[in-house]
Amino acid sequence: QLAEQFNVTRSTVREALKILQFMGVLSSSQGSGYRVADDMSNALSSTMQIFLASLGYTYKSISEIREALELESVVLIQEHGASDKEIAYLEQLVYEMRKTDNITPIDIEFHKFIAKISGNPIIETVTNALSSISESYILIPWANLSVAEKQALIDVHSQIIQNLKKQDKVISENAISKHYTLADQILETHNKH
């Protein structure tokens, strides 16, 4: 049907479907054909990686976009408020950060969850896609950070939660900006060595 509709050969349609599957837009199973993927953030991440690579992106440029999205997430959370259960989950993540030798996956989950509770599915999807891309830039093992750096990162996550509880947009935004500034400084310091 697609070949007829678009006036192309069947092999062209098969190749296009395989490319869309590779990009994560479609999924397939034997006997049932192709269907649109359930989680589009993987597809978006793949597409964004190709696009951003052509622009010569850096960790810093991705960090700036992630910060902007998270600042808007905080504004949206302040408008409708975070539930006690959502706050408790964020607090649990910070508790886990204090106990682990590798904060990276917990940190990523923390920020993805902030996007999720914003209530904006586009912010959530783009944040998830950017998190996948920026993960490859978080090359500093947690064990290589100083005790002071580790503590500062954990403390700023706690400040984000406390400010969400207070429902003060300005101090919440300041905590988000402080987090990204601190993370960028730590990455720059360690990447110089």
Image (cartoon, rainbow, N blue to C red):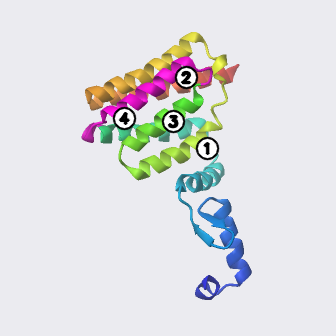
- Label 3 belongs to which residue? 109
How far is mark 2 from mark 4, CA to CA?
29 Å
**Precedes in sequence: disc 1 or disc 2:** 1
Residue name at image x 48 percent, y 20 percent: 154
Horizontal and vertical percent position of residue 61: 55, 39
The foreground one among 90 and 30 is 30
- Label 2 belongs to which residue? 185
Report if the CB atoms under discs 3 and 4 are less than 8 Å apart: no
How far is mark 2 from mark 3, CA to CA?
21 Å
- Label 4 belongs to which residue? 86
**Precedes in sequence: disc 2 or disc 4:** 4
Residue name at image x 29 percent, y 27 percent: 165
Q: Which residues are magenta?
A: 78-102
The foreground one among 191 and 119 is 119
How far is mark 1 from mark 2, CA to CA?
18 Å
Dominant secondary structure of the magenta stretch? helix
- The three-letter amino acid code for the residue at tag 1 is Tyr
